[in-house]
């Protein structure tokens, strides 16, 4: 079993007591080399959680395994007590920006509309209702003026906001985001974090793979330390400390946490 | 125009449309080479099917050949997955092996089979109208027309039904998987359609032209549009235009139809490659030149903004100070004058109000990289068009 910290049992204001995501004994391997090893994780409903860890710690792999994109060699995942396959509609995913070809011949509006495909299912096409939802999501991320722009004509920050809008349009309960702050300008970073905080306010659960340790206490209320194994998970105020950082990154870490 | 000529053009056009559809997705998935692999490695499937049925247009032959196409893709992926060789190497290993099996099978049975390697590579479009589809004595047209027509209807139906799924899984595999559209199923579906299209077109245009018809129209369309549906329509139009014009070129030159169609496809791509409005070579070079001039203009304006002393602003001193050639200085000076950004008084240059505003805005943009500040300047200056 994985290490449980004391923090797990403590109350936070955002959490409702319901478990949104539960991961049991998850092991994932590429070519028989474990990338994630025996992960047990419970993510309470309503938290804004960062997953932190060094490069190659398996952060993206964890998200992809939860979403069924990668097949684990052992373990199981449940979303609100049911397998992911039955809960697809309740989950939205923002992949790393670099995972797609931005020269693809399509517009900003069209990419956002893709977020509605899941609710449509096979064969059925998006109509006026889906288009309206996509336009609303574009408005929320401040990208409405760019709706007809070809996606390669957008800046890195704008592309990230398009990805965020595509997740918003899914109107899910749980949002998974893989490094949404990577390579974006300061304005976009603020815009994104404001939307994430709004999502939490609306009772959604948001899980973010995050790199910048300095901003963890400012942006998030929950954190998971990961390095192939789970090091710790819990409220930022309880477990975001030098001890866990050192365990995760393997070197002495000193992060001054602002109160 | 005789009915034979019309039939040949009709077959060539149907083949072009059927090829352009999977071709567009292969190009977008950066899998153009896999169509080359499929077109060659289906040969053993065709040969074995032919031995069994003795009929080049039999459905069994199409099924067997499509199966060989899928086997090719699976083999390539299997070899690649071992991590010992890269994808292009895997393709280069698999298809010659399968193709050569087909060649040996033909050679061993050359006496009782009227199927030769030339026909396989270049097709027999000119002879296609002679193999008629007869139903209880009634002539229903050439068999190839029925085969390619059938393949086209299948391809179009699948495209219309699964357009959304194809688009999302081509653009973003991860999202497609998380939404429940299995990228594996879509991938093999596309491979199956590509194989079936290749087999359907094989008889008419041969292994080499199939590849050209799949890739060249899609590659040309890619340079001309920013929208997937339009790319498909352009690719289809290009394919049909090349097929028909290629036929007439062959007719006038008394040359191979397949060769002429391929030549037209090549010429078409070359034209688009050179002259495409935004992504063509000429447009790109023109844009680069404009940007160079405009960066010079900005440097010049900034110099004027930073220096109030007259000697720094004398026309003749500009050459020395900014270290430009005469031609470039003149070009920049004229551009600035034309846009009312500077004024000249006895060869002393000074910024106008407009020039001042423009310079500060441009500097602001370059420092902060905020698009909103220069949105209105995009119409006039290449520098700001991203």
Image (cartoon, coloured by chain):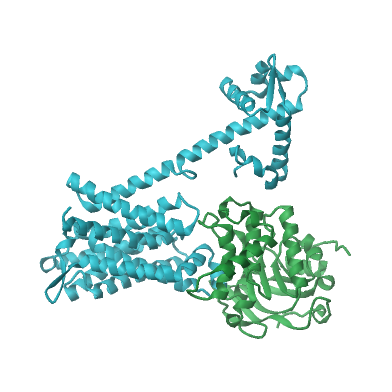
Which of the image's four quarters has the C terminus of chain B? Answer: top right
Which is more toward the observer, A249 or B98?
B98
Q: Quadrant of residue A254?
A: bottom right
The picture places residue B28, in percent across and down from the top left corner, at 46, 58
Q: Is residue A69 visible?
A: no
Provide residue B133's location: percent of width, then percent of height: 17, 70
A10 or A108: nearer the viewer: A108
| B107 in relation to A21, above or below | above
Q: Colour of chain B?
A: cyan
Residue B314, given in percent of the width and then of the height, sits at 70, 17
Q: Residue at x 49, y 71 (%)?
A: B183
Residue toward you, A239 or B151:
B151
Left/right placement of residue A238 relative to residue B6 reads right
| Residue A55 figure quarter | bottom right
Q: What shade has chain A been given?
A: green
| Relative to A163, residue B366 above or below | above
Look at 20% across and 51% down and name the residue there.
B256
Q: Name the residue furthest bottom.
A: A81
Question: In the image, what residue occupies the spot 65% across and 61% down?
Answer: A138
Q: Where in the figure is residue A205, as x and y percent of width and height?
A: 72, 74
The image quadrant of residue B108 is bottom left
Residue sitting at x 58%, y 50%: A153
């Amino acid at each position: 079993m994985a290490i449980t910290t004391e923090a797990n049992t403590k109350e936070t204001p955002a959490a409702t007591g319901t478990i949104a995501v539960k991961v049991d004994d998850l092991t994932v391997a590429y070519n028989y080399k474990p990338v994630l090893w025996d992960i047990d994780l419970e993510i309470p409903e309503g938290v804004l959680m960062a997953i932190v860890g060094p490069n190659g710690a398996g952060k993206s792999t964890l998200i992809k395994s939860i979403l069924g994109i990668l097949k684990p060699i052992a373990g199981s995942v449940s979303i609100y007590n049911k397998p992911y396959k039955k809960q697809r509609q309740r989950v939205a995913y923002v992949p790393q920006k670099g995972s797609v070809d931005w020269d693809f011949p399509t517009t900003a509006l069209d990419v956002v509309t893709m977020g509605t495909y899941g609710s449509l299912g096979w064969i059925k096409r998006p109509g006026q209702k889906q288009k309206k939802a996509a336009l609303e999501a574009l408005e929320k991320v401040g990208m409405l003026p760019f709706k007809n722009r070809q996606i390669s004509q957008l800046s890195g920050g704008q592309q990230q906001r398009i990805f965020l809008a595509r997740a918003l349009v899914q109107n899910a309960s749980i949002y998974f985001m893989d490094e949404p702050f990577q390579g974006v300008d300061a304005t976009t970073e603020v815009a994104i974090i404001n939307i994430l905080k709004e999502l939490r306010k609306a009772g959604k659960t948001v899980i973010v793979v995050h790199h910048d340790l300095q901003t963890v206490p400012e942006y998030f209320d929950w954190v998971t330390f990961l390095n192939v194994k789970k090091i710790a998970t819990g409220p930022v105020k309880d477990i975001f400390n030098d001890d866990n950082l050192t365990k995760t990154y393997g070197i002495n870490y000193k992060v001054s946490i602002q109160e | 125009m005789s009915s034979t000529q019309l039939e040949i053009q009709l077959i060539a056009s149907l083949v072009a449309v059927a090829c352009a559809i999977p071709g567009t997705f292969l190009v977008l998935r950066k899998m153009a080479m896999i169509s080359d692999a499929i077109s060659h490695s289906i040969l053993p499937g065709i040969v074995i099917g032919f031995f069994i049925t003795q009929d080049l247009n039999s459905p069994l032959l199409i099924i067997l050949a499509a199966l060989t196409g899928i086997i090719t893709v699976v083999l390539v992926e299997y070899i690649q997955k071992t991590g010992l060789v890269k994808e292009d190497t895997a393709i280069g290993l698999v298809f010659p092996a399968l193709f050569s099996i087909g060649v040996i099978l033909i050679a061993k049975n050359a006496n009782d089979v009227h199927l030769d390697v030339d026909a396989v590579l270049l097709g027999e479009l000119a002879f296609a109208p002679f193999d008629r589809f007869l139903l209880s004595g009634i002539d229903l047209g050439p068999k190839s027309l029925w085969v390619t027509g059938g393949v086209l209807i299948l391809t179009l139906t699948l495209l219309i039904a699964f357009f959304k799924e194809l688009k999302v899984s081509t653009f973003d595999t991860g999202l497609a998987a998380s939404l429940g559209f299995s990228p594996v199923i879509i991938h093999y579906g596309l491979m199956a359609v590509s194989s079936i299209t290749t087999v359907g077109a094989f008889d008419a245009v041969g292994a080499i032209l199939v590849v050209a018809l799949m890739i060249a129209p899609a590659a040309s369309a890619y340079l001309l549009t920013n929208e997937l549906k339009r790319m498909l329509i352009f690719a289809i139009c290009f394919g049909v235009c090349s097929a028909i014009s290629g036929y007439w070129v062959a007719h006038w030159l008394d040359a191979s139809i397949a060769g002429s169609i391929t030549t037209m496809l090549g010429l078409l791509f070359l034209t688009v490659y050179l002259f495409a409005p935004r992504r063509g070579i000429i447009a790109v070079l023109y844009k680069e030149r404009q940007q160079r001039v405009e960066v010079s203009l900005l440097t010049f304006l900034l110099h004027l903004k930073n220096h109030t002393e007259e000697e720094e602003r004398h026309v003749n001193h500009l050459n020395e100070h900014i270290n430009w050639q005469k031609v470039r200085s003149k070009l920049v000076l004229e551009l600035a004058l034309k846009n009312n950004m500077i004024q000249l008084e006895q060869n002393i240059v000074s910024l106008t109000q407009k020039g001042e505003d423009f310079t500060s805005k441009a500097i602001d943009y370059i420092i902060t990289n905020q698009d909103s500040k220069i949105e209105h300047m995009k119409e006039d200056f290449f520098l700001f068009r991203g």
